[in-house]
Image (tube, helix red, strand yellow):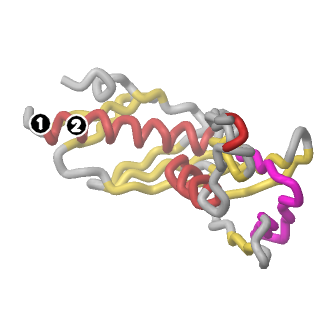
Amino acid sequence: MSRIGKRVIAVPPETKVTIDGRIITVQGPKGTLTREIHPLVRVERQGNNLIVKRADDTRQSNSMHGLTRTLIDNMVTGVTKGFSRQLLITGVGYKVDEKDSHLVFHLGYSHPIDFPLPDGIKARVEQQKGIRVVLEGCDKELLGLIASKIRSLRPPEPYKGKGIRYIDEQIIRKAGKTAAS
């Protein structure tokens, strides 16, 4: 039995959960999320709680049990509280501009990079101890994907520490050639 899968998901009163066959829809103050559930698991509602159950005791069913419970819990948390991810941009001359639903990055290349934001993701730029980009949204999966795409525009380099990194990421700095002599 999956330790994570057997936990109960508490549904807040302002959140509405609809289970239609294998499709689950969660609506809340921050938005609406829909997901198709794997056939090896089923979701049952008991009062203000959701319970994820397995179809059988196979290895795949056991792994899908915990995964499905976590995905549904992230959906409920996302539509009630939302998620955020912060990126820190470090480097001389590096900057970011906000334009409608786009971010325009100037990262030392010969051209600016126009990055369109998908629906459901909001971004704001803060100027404190470097440039900080705060991404917010209700879909944790999409938010992580967009944050990783932005980070891949100019990954942090280990010698000077320039580039785009997550706010909680530690960059292990290397000594340059002058340290050897």
The residue most toward the bottom is 111
Mark 2 lies on a secondary structure that is helix
Mark 1 lies on a secondary structure that is helix
- 122 horizontally vs 97: left or right: left
Q: Which residue is mark 2?
A: 63
Q: Is residue 66 magenta?
A: no
For residue 157, which numbered disc appears in the image?
none
Task: For the residues labelled 1 and 2, say whether their Cβ atoms are less than 8 Å apart.
Answer: yes
- Where is residue 91 shown, x and y percent of the image? 82, 52
User: Foreground residue, 174 or 129?
Assistant: 174
| Quarter-of-image position of residue 50 | top left
Decide whether the magenta segment is chiefly helix, strand or loop.
strand
- 2 horizontally vs 166: left or right: left
- Where is residue 24 shown, x and y percent of the image? 38, 51
Q: Which residue is mark 1?
A: 59
- Where is residue 143 shown, x and y percent of the image? 59, 52
Magenta highlight range? 87-107
